[in-house]
Image: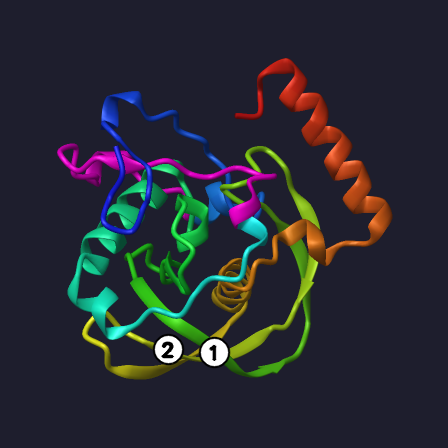
Amino acid sequence: MRGEFGERIRPRHYRQTRLVGYNTDFHSAGLFYNRGAIDNHMPLLDIVTYPDPILHTVGRPVDAEDLENGLADAVSRMFETMYEAGGVGLAAPQVGISKRFFVMDVRDEDGNKRPQTFINPQVIHIEGEQIGEEGCLSFPGLFQTIRREMRVVVRALDLTGNEFEADLEGLGARCILHETDHCDGIVFIDRVTPIKREIARRKIKRLQQTGEWV
């Protein structure tokens, strides 16, 4: 079954959960979310896994017609799918929608949710540096050490079509850059050295052969 934007929808009871995220410390940081808060009536989306060609396709800009015709529903399903999978960010190409938008929820220090939607994101300022392990819901079980900027200012639209700017540091900045990469057809293993990328691809191939990568 497919949604308004071509996203692949599965009834919830068929969903295979994958607990992966950006950082191996997420469990202790409380960033893998409690599934008990999820609406069990909303069908989840299929998360596309590498090497699906859509992950290396530059997403098309969201237009006014998209905002009026089902984008909010797609965003709601993306949030539920992201929470179920234990992630903190999910971009449209990862659920089969070749459009420039993503959702994220990097919780505050008290563990409170901060769901955010970024439509047609533009990174307008970056500074500093952070180096840490990153994962991706489209690369289940694979983690790589990635260099990212420490601070990011991004300009985007919200679901009402209003423009806003967000200034984030640390994990929030890493998430913004990771998801914006998805909108640009870039995956996180593109950010490592050729040797590390080849090692990652060989690991993926082994997992595919054993049926652990679907």
* Figure quadrant of residue 82: top left
What colour scheme governs how the chains and residues are painted in the rendered image of this protein?
rainbow
Residue at horizontal 61 percent and vertical 39 percent from the top: 51
Q: How many marks?
A: 2
* Residue holding disc 1: 122
Categorize mark 2 by other alpha carbons within 10 Å: few (<14), some (14-19), many (20+): some
Magenta part, dominant SS:
loop
Residue 85 is a magenta residue? no
Above or below: residue 164 compared with residue 69: below
* Figure quadrant of residue 120: bottom left
**Magenta segment boundaries in residue numbering:** 31-54
Above or below: residue 155 compared with residue 142: below
Residue at horizontal 86 percent and vertical 46 percent from the top: 195
Q: For the view shown, which residue lies furthest in the top direction?
A: 210
Residue at horizontal 24 percent and vertical 82 percent from the top: 162
Question: Can you give x and y, in whole percent of width and height, for residue 72 in the image?
Answer: 20, 59
Is residue 79 among what the camera can see?
yes
Q: Circle 1 — which element? A: strand
Question: Can you give x and y, in whole percent of width and height, for residue 16 in the image?
Answer: 38, 25
Cα distance in 3D space between marks 2 and 1: 6 Å
Above or below: residue 14 compared with residue 31: above
Q: Circle 2 — which element? A: strand
Q: Type of residue at label 2?
A: Ala
Q: In screen coordinates, is 54 left or right of 203?
A: left
Q: In screen coordinates, is 184 left or right of 97?
A: right
Q: Type of residue at label 1?
A: Gln
Question: Can you give x and y, in whole percent of width and height, for residue 203 in the image?
Answer: 73, 29
* Residue holding disc 2: 156
Mark 2–mark 1 CB contact (< 8 Å):
yes
Categorize mark 1 by other alpha carbons within 10 Å: few (<14), some (14-19), many (20+): some
Residue at horizontal 26 percent and vertical 55 percent from the top: 75
